[in-house]
Amino acid sequence: MTLLTLVYDPAENGQLTNLKFEDILYIESVNRIITYHHKNGKIYTAPHKLEDFEKSIALKKMRLFRLDHRNFVKLTAIKTYDKKNGIVQFNTANNTFAHIAEKNSAFLSLSLDIIEEPAALFALVIKEDKELMNINIKDCFKIESVNRIVTYHHLNGCIYSAPQKLRDFSLSRILSSLGIVRLDHRNFVNLNYIRFYDVQEGVVYFEKEPKLCSQKAHVAAKNRFFIETHLQLKEV
């Protein structure tokens, strides 16, 4: 999908031109004027309000998100993220950077952890008869810690356990590539199997019409914006 914006070209005495959103590194508001930072190094301006972009699904599909009160940032263009100082830098020769609001730190961290390449990862678990076996983690819709024991909730209806700590999974890039991310202090959830999100309760379900007995997983407050955005993009 190609989306264009009408802007002033700084090299042509303010003549109007079109830019492709896919070529924009980030968008910000400077003195109430929208500025587009292009991958060619130029900065273009346009008479819009930043709020005009808030609900755009097209921008989100291109991974452009509002990460500060005066910018939209393209996630796939980010080269480094300095969490301590709240800034990201881009894949450019110069030192172009954008500020990240603290409230969006969790969303950005989760988003950057999701890798596009498919991967396979197996877990060594214990069945109910105490026999050891392997399961493919991509077939698990939830991993959680119960009484300090890691449990895997499998699509086949079985629950397997393993003598590990949940924090062992925190730095795994392979889990992230499978869409399995930490949404709360005691769970990891496979984003591919979420079917319903209760916004009021901050809980995700793995059925479209959940019942009282349905499996669910809690979403920490800092991760709820990420879940809302992820599910919104899945519906497009």
Image (cartoon, grey):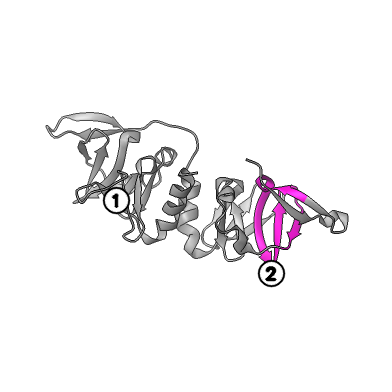
- Give, as a three-letter code, the residue at label 2: Arg
Instruction: Return the residue nearer the eye: 196 or 217.
Output: 196
Query: Which residue: 45% across, 32% down?
Result: 118
The residue identified by callout 2 is: 32
The residue identified by callout 1 is: 217
Q: Is residue 152 left or right of residue 81?
A: left
Query: Which residue: 74% across, 53% down?
Result: 6
Percent x, y of residue 153: 25, 40
Q: In the image, which residues are magenta?
A: 18-47
Asked if residue 92 can be seen in this view, the reply is no
Rounded to the nearest angstrom, the CA distance separating label 2 from label 1 is: 41 Å
Image vertical order of residue 164 relative to residue 36, above or below: above
Percent x, y of residue 54: 56, 59
Secondary structure category for the residue under label 2: loop
Image vertical order of residue 68 relative to residue 119, above or below: below
**Label number found at residue 23:** none
Q: Is residue 105 magenta?
A: no
Earlier residue among tags 2 and 1: 2
